[in-house]
Image: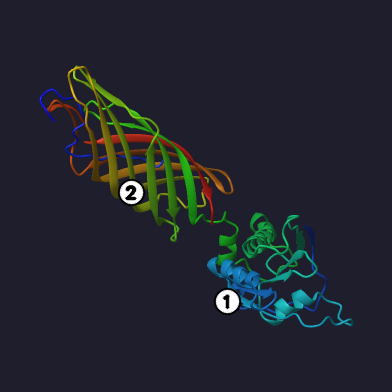
Amino acid sequence: MGPAQAGADASVVATASVVASASVAPPASVAPPTPVAPAASERIAVVAPPGSDVTARLLAELRFLGFSAEVHELGPPDPSAEGDPLLELAQRHGAAAVIAVDDQGGRVEVTIVDRMTGKRLSRQLALGASETEADPREVAVRSVELLRASLLEAEQAPPPPEADVELSAPARRTLRRPRPRLTLGAGAAVGGAPGGVPVATHARAFVRYTPHPWVGAVLVGNVPLHAPEVRAAEGSARVRAGWVSAGPRVALRPPDATVVPDLSITAGAAFVGMSGVPAPGYEGARSRVVDAIFEGAAGLEVAVAPRVRVRLDAAAAVCARTVRVRFAERPAATWCRPHVLGSLGIGVVAW
């Protein structure tokens, strides 16, 4: 670049970011209940087609909550029997509850016999007009929700006389809101840095995976919505910066709480493009640079619906090197030492 030149000569780049980051009826009377050992209070009997996707998913959901779930066959109905065959099955196998799934005849019916509350609940799941069979995940989740509905009575009042099994730890976990494990989100972010480069707005997207109740990982991407300009007598330079980063995230409250603050530290790559718009007598130049960026963020997430979260973030980041904008070899502005950003976004729990 000659002495009479207006351009964006980046000795380095980087950027910072922030995560915009039933019927209910008591079971039929039966013989006196069989005492259940403590371990049996965590046992759930599943009556469903062995080897089916629905059965596999339901077993996985129950085991994730801490129950010992096993598949059992109900057997042919006995016309002479007066008791509830599902309750008798639970007593015979020492289970705290039975979940029976019947997906025959183009409909899905879920029945819960719960010895922890002495209740029997049934619900038919409606399929969409375009669906030929039920989604295994939906059936499993709805079945667990029906079990949760039954257990609510045991939590809110003394055990009813019909109950013959104590409420177990897995059952209490079931009463909690389902813990989000995979969340996808997007929003808008506004950020800037001292040094002369104006404030910029970005579209921000994030993916968060939380395999552990408190610790997980987050991936964040940022795309500039406009190019802020640095102006001087020699002309102007338009600066566009985007970045992607990933790192650990720690929740400061249980993830199924309504309000969850968290902290994260991420590292990644920043991509900066600079375009010079010269004044008369000068020449413009373009420059593209890739640099490393490191960010610390504090966020606050509010559950507004079972699967919807509103998220606020504040973050500060620093680049490995300083981003400089030069006019005719004269430093005119610097960026990302540090960079601060705030964002507002919406997240959806995918799983």
Q: Is residue 169 left or right of residue 334?
A: right
The reply to whether discs 1 and 2 touch (Cβ–Cβ < 8 Å) is no
Residue furthest left as drawn: 3
Q: Nearer the viewer, residue 272 or 147?
A: 272
Q: Which mark is residue 245?
A: 2
Q: Residues within 10 Å of mark 2 (few under 14, many from 20)?
A: many
Residue at 28% in and 47% down:
269
- Report which quarter residue 100 is drawn in: bottom right
Question: Residue 121: horizontal and vertical position, in percent?
Answer: 76, 63
Q: Secondary structure at mark 1?
A: helix
Q: Is residue 165 visible?
A: yes
Q: How is the image coloured?
A: rainbow
Question: Residue 22: horizontal and vertical position, in percent?
Answer: 77, 57
Q: Residues within 10 Å of mark 1 (few under 14, many from 20)?
A: few
Q: Nearer the viewer, residue 351 or 202?
A: 202
Task: Please name the amino acid that badge 1 sits on.
Answer: Ala
Q: Is residue 303 left or right of residue 106?
A: left
Question: Residue 324: horizontal and vertical position, in percent?
Answer: 18, 33
Vertical side of 132 occupied by 80: above or below:
below
Q: Secondary structure at mark 2?
A: strand
- Report which quarter residue 237 is drawn in: top left
Gap between marks 1 and 2 measured at Cα: 45 Å
Q: Which mark is residue 292?
A: none
Q: Is residue 120 visible?
A: no
Q: Which residue is mark 1?
A: 39
Task: Please name the amino acid that badge 2 sits on.
Answer: Ser
Quadrant location of the C terminus in the rendered image? bottom right
Question: Residue 300: horizontal and vertical position, in percent?
Answer: 43, 41
Residue at 72% in and 59% down:
131
Q: Earlier in the sequence, mark 1 or mark 2?
A: 1
Q: Nearer the viewer, residue 74 or 135?
A: 135
